[in-house]
Image (cartoon, coloured by chain):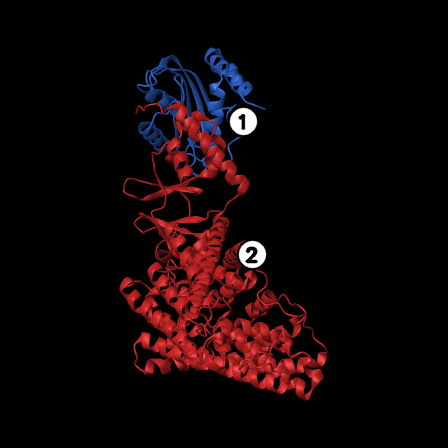
Amino acid sequence: MKTRSEPAPLFLRRLMEALRWRLWIAEKLHPTEWQTTLLWAALAGFLGALASLVFSGMAEGIHEFLTGSSAGVVESMRQLPWWACIAVPATGGLLAGLVLQFGKKLTRDQSSTDYMEAIVIGSGHLPIRSSLVKCTAALFSIGSGGSIGREGPMVQLAAMLASFVGRARRFTPPQQRLLVACGAAAGIASAYNAPIAGSFFVAEIILGTIAMESLGPLAVAAVVAALTMRVLTNAAQLYHVPAFKLHSPWEMGPYILLGLLAGVVAPWFLRSLRGAERLFVATKLPLTARLILGGLVVGALAIRVPEVCGNGYSVVVDILNGNLGNLVFGFHLRNGHLVWIALALVFACKWLATAASFGSGALGGVFTPSLFMGASLGYLFGTAVNAVWPAGAADPGAFALVGMGAFLSAASRAPVMAVILLFEVTLSYDIILPLLLCSVLAYYTAKGIEDQSLYSESLRRKASEQPAAGLPAGRVADLMKADPPVLAVTARFAEIAQRFLSVRVNNLYVIDAAGRFLGVVSLHDIKPYLAEPEVAELVLAQDIMHEDFPRLGPDQSLSEALGGFLGITAERLPVVEPGGRLLGSLAKGDLLLTLVEKRKSPPPG
Amino acid sequence: MNPPPNLLAQPDAVVLDLPVTSGEAAIRALHARLALLPAVTDPDGFMRDLMERAAVSSVCISPEVALPHARTSAVSRLLLAVGRATPSVAFDAGHPAVRLVILIGTPKKQVAEYLQLVAGMARLLKNEKVRAALLAAPTEAEFRAVLARGLPG
């Protein structure tokens, strides 16, 4: 019979004590894999908010440098001489182009930087250098007054940081995708101080599901981001608006018409952006020249209509507050007819400027410009109705607010997010009835006209270009994590305890010398005996392993794998090849996330 | 499949004077007693598993006590046999004078019950008075009574 040397009793006692403490803490706090995910989501939210703050500050700094004014974008452009109005956006285009051109050398062989693509059809990996190059280019486009939103790069940066954290922690692709989605939610929440909309933006538009498996972490990230912004910047709601209300039920008629109108105009707005892009590409000019040309168009429009510059935020604030006296040419307009014409002019010029910026390849978001389009459209419509039927649209400002929600709903194809965002950025609940109705009507109308949203086309195109990078085909091997923590069949109790201390799992896999899977040792089994050194000295892994533990094959389908988790409490199952060799493990969380994601993967072609 | 609640107090077999001179012989002697029970479905397999386990690592929990055991498909329920060696026997180089031999057979699925039995026996035999009483018990009945008294509750 074999002799063994006695393990050091003191070491063994301390080891057991450490494991007992770890188990006590684990039992009190119960940090499951999902709860741990929430902690990482919170970190993604915090980093996302910081990234947004830095980007915002740098964009303002560049704008001040280029215009010599620290006033808002529209105000500073209004103060510039005509030649500077043209020169500033064109210079921004030039600088953005140069950054992209030289950045290409730094970012060779790097994968796509699109965060939506990384979440929906990629592995959640966002390359840092490429993202930084694009965000730097966006800084110049936005800082020089380009008619484009800053929320796009903010979301991109927040998602990139989340991706970095996920990679550093060696997350699995589903976890990584979820963390990048959390970063994106944090970016939106930071940009608009709207945590609920931030969560729903990603859930509704990108993930296509509001299942708690994904919505929970998104909400945590968005809340932490919004909280960080509030603490660091005293941020409040984005748009301070007067109290709007439904003056009479008769107003619902015009509101319904507004919903239909927004549903018709939004698809044309999107088509015009894509058309402008094609037009710029057709010029065969290099990217830098296209960006300069886009800047020149915006600048030329800004000579007379400075409201075209920037994301349209300040004009929307003026519209919502009925403060349109300074619109166009700086004239103090009192005549309602003239105000209507002036706003119609701004609406048309802003549309053209956004198409020029977007089409020229300027990097930024069209989310806030969409809000501008909706507000203008709503106000113009409300004013027109008011002129012929005052009781039908008592307050055109309320129509502007509802128009924003309807237009955003139609453009993004996310009506729930649109309603929530409008509520969060205005904190105006009184207008909820027409807002909800119009958003839904606009959504269905737009969907009937064109089955493409602000985001769907690029995702569809990328998905068809990169079929291999898409979601897992549905095999266990695609989701499996290699190198799970293992034990030798002769491992002693002390070694088992040490392994349980070093890795946060509830089951350790027992393998033989050839790497064949033999069974699992359960933490649950050994827990009651951690204070008993005699047991610890006697017991080996082979004495306490469960040989009938369920296992998965690498070629099994994901739905079959889900069946494997039924009836057991394990968070992971071993993946074993037909010959018996242990290949890895599959986490239930990854499986559920992937199945949830697969419900709305972009259609091919 | 739970172990009989009184298994610790009422082992399947008690042998007060093991006529052996080695650890292996002690295991064989106790195994022979258990092999008569219908719960042992494959006596040879049971023996093989006991010896294999003892070959992997020492089965002694103190200088005086050995706990040979096997998780095996050769038994249909938890089995316990207790033997007293007079004089002592050598189980291995580290344990040259073992007096009490506790042999356990466990069905493969009963991990928790196995640990429960091993821990219970270890707890019991840690008590020096119990050990002394077991070594001094003149009859099987007294031996069993000491086991029963030594158990909590």
**Letter of the chain that mark 2 sits on in the rendering:** A
Q: Image quadrant for the C terminus of chain A? A: bottom left
Q: Colour of chain B?
A: blue
Same chain for the residues under marks 2 and 1 in the image:
no
Nearest the camera: B107 or B99?
A: B99
Along the viewing direction, whichever of A542 and A227 lies nearer the viewer: A227
Q: Which chain is red?
A: A
Q: Quadrant of the N terminus of chain A?
A: top left
> Dot 1: within a 10 Å radius of its alpha carbon, few (fewer than 14), some, or many (20 or more) residues?
few
**A496 above or below A473?**
above
Check disc 1 and give the amino acid type: Asn
Residue A416: name its quadrant: bottom right
Residue position for label 1: B6
Secondary structure of the residue carrying tag 1 is loop
Using the rendered view, name the quadrant where residue A515 is placed. top left
Residue type indicated by callout 2: Arg
- What chain letter is assigned to the residue under label 1? B
